[in-house]
Amino acid sequence: MAQAAESSCSLPTQSSLMYVDETILNAELLEHLVRSILCTEREQGEAALLGLAASGATRRLPEGHLGAVLVFLPGMAEIRYCINRLQRSSLLHEEEVGPLWILPLHGQLPSHEQKKVFQRAPR
């Protein structure tokens, strides 16, 4: 992690970051993080993680259209692995987190496939 980013974190976070190996993809952590984000949105509303409620700003998504999660990964093999892992995850049952639409996005995809990330997820 960049030095400037580390210095803006709390001391406990900085301490935890010392033990992070950025060369290892922790797919289990990704599953838990995605579950946490989706469950928080469903339980507390789509603005729960946007910091809008505290500022008094409002942003409403159409009913039943919660936000998206964008995950950056280092390569196509990691993208494929994580898509497969998330699709099979026992932590991401539709009845608990809502329907998922997991899409790859990388430069080797045809443009019509890349453009899917701008579409609304099917319900």
Image (spheres, grey):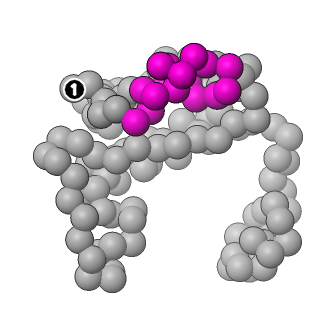
Among the 4 quarters of the image, the one containing residue 28 = top right
Vertical comparison of 44 with 3: above or below: above
Tell me residue 77's x, y (percent): 73, 20
Q: Is mark 1 on a helix, strand or loop?
A: loop
Most distant residue in the left direction = 63
Front-lying residue, 63 or 117: 117
Residue 109 is one of the magenta-drawn residues: yes
Per the image, the residue denoted by label 1 is 123
Instruction: Specify whether residue 86 is in view.
Output: no
Within-10-Å neighbours for mark 1: few <14, some 14–19, many 20+: few
Tell me residue 22's x, y (percent): 82, 47
Residue ID at (71%, 79%): 8
Among the 4 quarters of the image, the one containing residue 25 = top right
Quadrant placement of the N terminus:
bottom right
Whether residue 11 sits left or right of residue 58 in the image: it is right
Residue type, numbered disc 1? Arg
Front-lying residue, 111 or 15: 111
Tell me residue 96's x, y (percent): 29, 35
Whether residue 114 sits left or right of residue 61 in the image: it is right
Residue ID at (58%, 41%): 71
Q: How many labels does the image show?
A: 1
Most distant residue in the front direction = 111
Tell me residue 89's x, y (percent): 49, 24
Vertical comparison of 119 with 109: above or below: below
Residue ID at (54%, 36%): 31
Residue 13 is one of the magenta-drawn residues: no
Instruction: Specify whether residue 49 is in view.
Output: yes
Quadrant placement of the C terminus:
top left
Residue ID at (17%, 48%): 62
Magenta residue span: 103-118
